[in-house]
Image (spheres, rainbow, N blue to C red):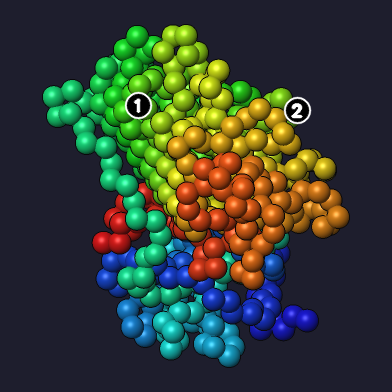
Amino acid sequence: MKYKIATYDLRNMGIHLAIGVLVLLFWGVHNAHAAACDHTYQSGSQPEASYGAAWNTLSAEKELLVEGISCQNTEATLKIGSDGNKQYVYKQGYYWNGNQWTSINLNSTNPLLANTWYKGNANGSIPLTDNKSTYAVGFVCQYVNNAWKCGCQDAACTESLWQIQGISEATNTYSGAVLEEPPVMDPNNTVVFENVCPEDAGFPTRNQMAGKDVVITLPSDRVCTSKGSIGGTNSNPSHNLRLIGGEIDIATSDEGGGALTVAWWDGTAMIEGIEIDMHQACSDAIRSYRVKGDGRMVVQNSYLRAPGYCTEGTHGDIIHIQGGEPSVGDVNLNELVVQNVRGDLINQGLFVPYRVDTAHGTKKLVLDHVELKLDTRYKHTENRIATMIYAGSYNGNSDLPPPNGQSYNEVYLNWWDPWYPDTIDRKNSTAPDVIGYDENECGIFSEQTKINNNILFGQWCKGSPPNGTFVPLDKIGLNYDRTYFVGQ
């Protein structure tokens, strides 16, 4: 049952608003700077039913439209709108006082238009409850493609809804992975490329990276739209590689390869703070290829989404450690370390089985604070199993586990599929598999499985991290903030 607390005629747009009772849920709070706020709904987050998104579903930047810009003790400053030239903010919002919705009159440095709208943004002060948190709603209209879009829940924006955000005072309770430090670069042999997308003329070529340590920073003010490849050449591989921040969005029709390929290097390749959205493209999000020497890979603080499924042999993985040609010096990846990473998959997550003859897979696998789940934006192919982790033999085939061991710390797998009932076999598919689950719904390996698969530490658990995602979207991608993840 819904309890309507307010209905407004938004002048000539013919739009009416209603708001229902919200059940307040616990959300995790994380480290940030003094007076900062944490948010329940980040860019890309699915809002509660009957509410609009707190972020801009109509822009490539996906910026927040409802947010707390300052949270201190008992009060928060609420901001509605993101200063867009064609954004209009309704003059009133609401906050949850613990028992009911309470209205708040917003204000702005811009004049009030038609006694109803502020252009660009509006602000107001709201109290925080005893646990220094609250929920708030606002309403933003945008003029897009010659039409008004208001209170959007998604890109289609077929409904006009109050846009909801959970706001809490940031605290120093960061509890993610203890991050591996970036590789040490040779000051006399390092090339640096800043604010470049793979499609830019200034993105490094293989010859520019050959034999070098390389640092690449993706833009913080625009989304990249093309696949990129980093590393040197077969005869002159790069040494250490570091790619920092940014977002890559790939078109659905694009098949093969990966959004980001790392190839021909012999040191540590670190990819951190990146957001990749494949939009069902049948390509990997991140893949390695043609590893040399002691090449290893570290993926940190990243969100990898929706590599698609086309046919049995054509699909994308969240991370795929591909092979090479041992006859020309290619080797298996020495180690794959994945820390603070979320992957939303359609068909397959981590694909890293060890194959000596094709230099496929990794010698060692370390997963630390990793969340893999089905991407609920897309309907999955019926009867296709969602393989979350593939790091060993599957159904008796010749694939091998990483010979130098596997470690799992705070790893969560959520294969619940909203499109099909529990009777459809789209559930627990991992290699190596477990023999059951303990009282905490965490997988149990048999002793023989541990021995056969070189499992050194840990287990994975069903569901999602109990205190929220390890990868807040407002701390990665275009807004990457490494300091958040190191607890400073």
Identity of the amino acid at label 1?
Answer: Asp
Quadrant into which the C terminus falls: bottom left
Residue 372 in picture, x, y percent from top left: 58, 50
Depth check, mark 2 against mark 1: the one in front is 1
Among all residues in the image, which is located at the extreme left?
Answer: 188
**Residue 294 numbered mark, or none:** 1
Q: Nearer the viewer, residue 109 or 381?
A: 381
Say if residue 400 shows up in the picture.
yes
Q: Residue at x 75, y 28 (%)?
A: 312
Residue 54 in picture, x, y percent from top left: 54, 62
Q: Residue at x 46, y 25 (%)?
A: 332
Q: Is residue 44 above or below residue 60?
A: below
Q: Residues within 10 Å of mark 1 (few under 14, many from 20)?
A: some
Q: Is residue 307 above or below residue 42?
A: above
Say if residue 61 shows up in the picture.
no
**Residue 311 numbered mark, or none:** 2
Q: Residue at x 65, y 39 (%)?
A: 348
Q: Nearer the viewer, residue 33 or 393?
A: 393
Q: Quadrant of residue 174?
A: bottom left
Query: How far, Cα to Cα, is label 2 from label 1?
Result: 34 Å
Q: Residue at x 47, y 41 (%)?
A: 405
Q: Which element type, helix, strand or loop, lies under badge 2?
A: strand
Residue 296 in picture, x, y percent from top left: 38, 32
